[in-house]
């Protein structure tokens, strides 16, 4: 069986765990800051997710893990402008050094009440390249989470073509 590895970063508390719990059928919580989830796709393929809280990102060696990882998912709270700060540097680092596919997902509770925070008009926002996509998600909406994974896999497949 082949295993594809993906990393889910969150800038707030347990968002990475909630994402993985709602998408994977098997999850192992290592600590409050890291968890591992497994999602069988077929008899030949399984996706393994590593969920990491951004506040402890310096405790892990991404230079060792990153060459094996197929892509990254970054979660931040759309309504909290400060929640994007912890992930901006990591997005820049990974997209520059590893040219890995990235999905940046803004967590929202209600798609109907979306507004654009001033932070996204300011010049210090983040830039996404051709291997990155931006989307919105509700961590309680399993279909939205599946779309994020499908989008990441599409970037990976298009990169191979």
Image: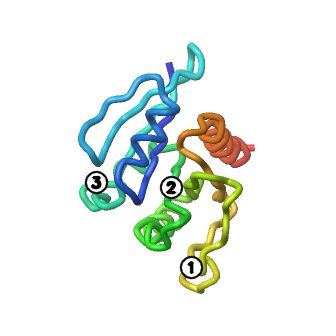
Label 3 crowd bin: few (<14), some (14–19), many (20+), radius 10 Å:
few
Residue 37 at what x, y percent from top left? Answer: 41, 31
Viewer-nearest of discs 3 and 2: 2
Q: Give SS at disc 1.
A: helix
Cα gap from disc 2 to disc 1, whole angstroms: 17 Å
Q: Pick whichever of labels 1 and 3 is earlier in the sequence.
A: 3
Residue at the disc numbered 3: 60
Picture quarter with the C terminus: top right
Residue at the disc numbered 1: 119
Residue 105 at what x, y percent from top left? Answer: 58, 55
Residue drawn at x 65%, y 66% is 129
Left or right relative to 125: residue 114: right
Viewer-nearest of discs 1 and 3: 1
Residue drawn at x 69%, y 62% is 130
Residue drawn at x 38%, y 28% is 27
Q: Pick whichever of labels 2 and 1 is earlier in the sequence.
A: 2
Residue 149: image quadrant is top right
Residue 26: image quadrant is top left
Q: Give SS at disc 3.
A: loop
Residue at the disc numbered 2: 74
């Amino acid at each position: 069986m082949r295993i594809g590895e993906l990393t889910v970063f969150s800038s707030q508390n347990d968002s990475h765990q909630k994402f993985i719990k709602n998408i994977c059928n098997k999850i192992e919580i290592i600590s409050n800051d890291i968890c591992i989830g497994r999602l069988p796709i077929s008899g030949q393929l399984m996706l393994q997710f590593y969920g990491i809280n951004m506040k402890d990102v310096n405790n892990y060696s991404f230079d060792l893990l990153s060459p094996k990882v197929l892509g990254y998912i970054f979660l931040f709270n759309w309504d909290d402008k400060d929640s994007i700060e912890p992930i901006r540097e990591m997005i820049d680092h990974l997209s520059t050094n590893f040219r890995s596919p990235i999905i940046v997902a803004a967590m929202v509770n209600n798609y109907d009440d979306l507004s654009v925070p001033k932070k996204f008009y300011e010049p210090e926002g983040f830039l996404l390249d051709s291997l990155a996509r931006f989307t919105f998600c509700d961590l309680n909406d399993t279909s939205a989470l599946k779309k994020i994974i499908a989008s990441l896999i599409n970037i990976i497949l298009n990169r191979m073509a």
